[in-house]
Amino acid sequence: MKPCKIHEIRNVGLVGHGASGKTSVAEAALYLSGVSDRLGKVGDNSSMMDYDPDEVKRGHSIGVSAAFLEWNKNKINLVDAPGSANFIADAVACLRVVDSAVVVVSAADGVQFYTEKFWKWADEQSLQRVVFVNKLDHERANIDPVLDSIRRKFKKKTALLHVPVGEGEAFSGIFDLVTNAYFVYQRGGKGVGQAGQPPKDLADELETRRAELVEAVAETDDELLEKYLENGELSQEDFNSGLRNGIQKGDLVPVLCGSALFNMGIDLLLNAMNEFLPPPNRRPALKAKSARDDSEIVVAADENAAVSGLVFKTIADPYAGKLTLFRVFSGSIKADSNVYNVNKQTSERVGQIFALQGKKQTPVPEVSAGDIGAVAKLKVTATGDTLGSPDSPLLFQPIRFPLPVLSRALVPKTRADEEKISAALHRLVEEDPTLKVDRDAKTHELLITGMGQAHLDVIIERMKRRFGVEVDVKPPKVPYLETIRGAAKVQGKYKKQTGGRGQYGDAWLEISPLPRGDGFQFENRIVGGAIPRQYVPAVEKGVHEAMSEGFLAHYPLVDIKVALYDGSYHDVDSSEMAFKIAGSLGFKKGVAECKPILLEPIMHMEVSIPGDYVGDIIGDLNSKRGKILGIDANEDSQTIKAHIPMASIMSYAADLTALTGGRGSFAAEFSHYDDLPEHIAAKVIEEAGKERK
């Protein structure tokens, strides 16, 4: 593809709830634009975007993938994001590097849980959006309830630009209300709509829909509204400019429709991307902070400015090495050059640079402001790092990935696996910021923590396939925490005489609770040199290490403030080690006096079911100690929102299938920690005691 100017680029994220058809939209666009010679299908080897063996096996996206195409002389970078709760991290990263989003909604299911989450995240990034109602070929397709759910859940005025002609098996064409043109499609054809005459029996509906659209456009501008009220209509010029301005201001949500599976309406969607979605130099100004003095910097999308970019994905391959995907916001990154990693404060050697089309890598001489690219074999650069210039280093806000919530213990099957497991997990952690690896100091268990069961299953399969490491997996444990309700003042004293130089440390601590979620705070109140300054960090370290194992059931302690307010020392026998032990002893002693309690993780859950099952599901959630937050009613389904303990829903997928005959779906994500009821805490404490024995 020829080099593009910045105004000829569109960076578009494809987002939406799982199974809404995002990847199918990308596959159809790549086929229609000539990038692919066949219409790729999700779940087989023909897909350009879902090429990972785990994606082929499961039939849905697991990681973000990028591809570019040319449409009407513009370059469109499509970034396809997963919609599953287990792999949501890549979707968060996707929205940080695109300038706009196509929100894909199923015509059969309407706006679902993660569609709303993506909309909220796009709001935070000030991204312009187009809604694409997909799957109009589905037997349950119905455009009107979908429009109602968009208006209700997004709280925005919709601008229906396309009217589908027929639904389900009868879906055959689209009437474009903007140009008043009708396009007929051949199912599974080349994807280019052929101009035709709409069915006569739709004349009244199309006239009504057009009038609704014109009125919606007029209401976005006082001058247009005045013209509309005077004339009862808008000129095509006023209508076009008003529609474009209304979309850019966020007053109107443009809604398009089609069927990606059968390549119908994708050409009109690509036209809309060019027409309504902004190039990089027209999106709201991006802000960063100076790495030198923390001052705010506005980053202009300028090819001649100092280079700045953000890494949004790392792919670890045991043979090809590490592949780093990045977006350039200003300046340019050239092949065979150096780039400065601002987070790591080091220079990285850049070899060949690529533009990606799924797994296919196309070498390019440079990636300029506004564009997306990839580079192989960077040594220290990781997802979320800022790439820039050492002369004017700036830092973009870190990507806020969701916290992992489900842990498993791994046991290598052989000594050879034990030797390889650390290297394999290190590479996988580079690739996946929501994967956490830790070794429990007390049990010596190797723990991995991820976003859910499916996430961890994929990690274990990748360890075997990519790195030849096999492990046994223990059942996941609920990640309880401990905290305190009361306060105490205690002395932590460590004194040991061994014949030569002894050990002496004496620290007085005040321990008190913090609000939920505040973590840990340490305050030094020493005055008058009661403890030398060099020993204070040792006390804090001792306290911090002691927090890793609680008083009740040996779970980590959180939300605690510790103040060091007095103590004593010995000129000869005192040491950092002595004060570290003193801090640990004092903290453990004090926690016992501070009314310690157990905390359990609470999940936010949304269960979508047919109305007939509402009573059964609410009863089941109540029996699991769930707290019902509300019910959203649609024409064909009900969505129950609840807070529920993680311990209660470890096998909820099977429970929901049994209760609804497979007609229900749910999404859950970590919400917060809450007090564990005493009668359940007693059982947890008892079980923890047995395990330690």
Image (spheres, helix red, strand yellow):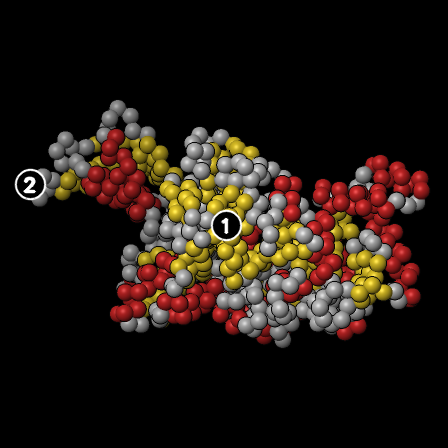
- Amino acid type assigned to the residue bearing label 1 in the image: Pro
Q: Quadrant location of residue 27? A: bottom right
Position of 661 with respect to 248 (left or right) is left
Q: Residue at x 30, y 39 (%)?
A: 540
Q: Residue at x 52, y 72 (%)?
A: 57
Can residue 547 be seen at all in this image of the molecule? yes
Q: Residue at x 48, y 64 (%)?
A: 455
Q: CA–CA distance between discs 2 and 1?
A: 68 Å
Q: Which residue is mark 2?
A: 500
Of residues 418 and 453, the one nearer the viewer is 418
Q: Earlier in the sequence, mark 2 or mark 1?
A: 1
The residue carrying pointer 2 sits among few (fewer than 14), some (14 to 19) or many (20 or more) residues within 10 Å by Cα, namely: few
x then y, percent, for residue 672: 50, 51
Query: Which residue extends farthest left?
Result: 499
Of residues 511 and 549, the one nearer the viewer is 549
Q: Which residue is mark 1?
A: 365
